[in-house]
Amino acid sequence: VKLTLPAQSEMLSKDFIYGVATASFQIEGGKDSRLPCIWDTFCNTANKIADGSNGEIACDHFTRWQDDIELIDSLGVDAYRLSISWPRVINESGEINQTGVNYYLNILKHLESNNIKAFVTLYHWDLPQHLEDKGGWLNRETAFKFRDYVDLISKAFSNKVHAYATLNEPFCSAFLGYEVGVHAPGIVGKEFGKKAAHHLLLAHGLAMKVLAINSPNSLNGIVLNFTPCYPESKSLEDIKATTFADDYFNQWYIKPLFDGKYPHILSQLPAEHQPVIHDGDMEIIAHKMDFLGVNFYTRAIYRADADEHFIQITPPEPRTDIGWEIYPKAFTELLVSLNERYRLPPIYITENGAAMADEIIDGVVNDQDRVDYYQQHLNAVNDAIEQGVSVKGYFAWSLMDNFEWAEGYLKRFGIVHVDYETQIRTIKNSGIAYKALITSR
Ligand code: GBH
């Protein structure tokens, strides 16, 4: 099994960065040595997680991190994208928890000695519970708490980080967490989502300013997820509905970063659904960035709806094990259109991958559908580069199977299989194919 690219592809240059990605809550476990976070609470609430599981052990990466770094190294990658658990490194009074910081310093040191670049995400959804108790992302103060955390941690990490992303996917935190409530903290109401989103973006901007001072030599930016929106038909109504959905879900999070304003649909939202914007906020949010992280999995299809502006329809096949349509063309079109609309810094694909129902047979995981997914999506990125988009790296989501949020352990995204009984890791055929591509350069 192997993944290939056209012979002249820029993605075959040694400067193009290939990596694997994870997030703290999804892999670490080690719950007793950190503060509780909103995902602990959410997992302990009935009927929120498909298999009733939690993140208390997960992949036990907290104790197995050294072996896991060897595993990462054995894949031949240039970079590892990990996230820092805020509740592990900062205590309730806002001071550094040195034991937690040392844990990550060790990881960073081992990455460095293996010549693997560290791409550090500062917030991948594990908000300390004590901050949620004061309103979480609905409380403007949380943005300043985030800034203070970033100040302390970026000083502690000094020069060991290649790239910092402030937030992972603020859309998910705001919309899934504070509007439809399928993610922690599980708050439901249209009046909440955009308020949470504004405080998240403010937190990002405040943190960018701190990073520019404390860590001027790293690449500093953000990671956004995009689910490009397509109309079900060519009717004007469907096209309008789709543009509204795109502004609501996608452009909402990128336009303020580069244009310093929200999409114009802001004024169409009922006043009580609108964020509270203070003077100067939009300038803080639009802080210059060194890179944009783009996460892509699938597209979405919309139809006009009289009451709700739009409704999302069930996508056609083929779909992955989590029900998301496999439609790589949307990846190219997304990158090209972002590049046309905004004055972007270099892009890193910080996540891309597929959930598949994997089986180990005689020690082999023959995940051919995932290999095909990666092949098609690497080609899609290459197509975008050929059309002039500056993409400098690509990270597979994920290094290994892990806690897939509301899906628990039922959905597997890894290029490495994890047996949750024994914690044995087995490189899947997709991992073998990814390594073959990387080492062929
Ligand atoms: C990422 O979120 C996360 O960063 C990561 O932690 C997670 O494990 C990984 O993806 C896999 O889920 O209903 O067809 O319109 C991705 C979040 C995925 C949210 C696509 C919106 C729309 C699917 N996005 N999803 S659809």
Image (cartoon, rainbow, N blue to C red):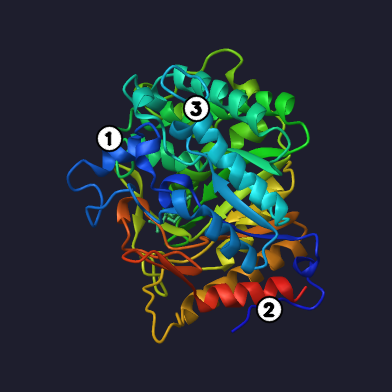
Label whose residue precedes the other's in the sequence (2 or 3): 2
Does label 3 point to a residue whose CB lies under 8 Å from ligand 1? no
The amino acid type of the residue labelled 2 equals Thr
How far is mark 1 from mark 3, CA to CA?
33 Å
Label whose residue precedes the other's in the sequence (2 or 1): 2
Residue 436 image position (x, y, % from top left): 66, 77
Q: Residue at x 29, y 32 (%)?
A: 189
**Side of 240 relative to 211 (left or right):** left
The amino acid type of the residue labelled 3 equals Asn
Residue 134 image position (x, y, % from top left): 34, 19
Residue 340 tag number: none
Label 2 neighbour load within 10 Å: few <14, some 14-19, many 20+: some
Label 3 neighbour load within 10 Å: few <14, some 14-19, many 20+: some
Q: Toward the viewer: 265 or 410?
A: 410
Q: Which residue is label 1 attached to?
A: 188
- Residue 15 found in image quarter: bottom right
Residue 4 tag number: 2
Q: Residue at x 73, y 24 (%)?
A: 213
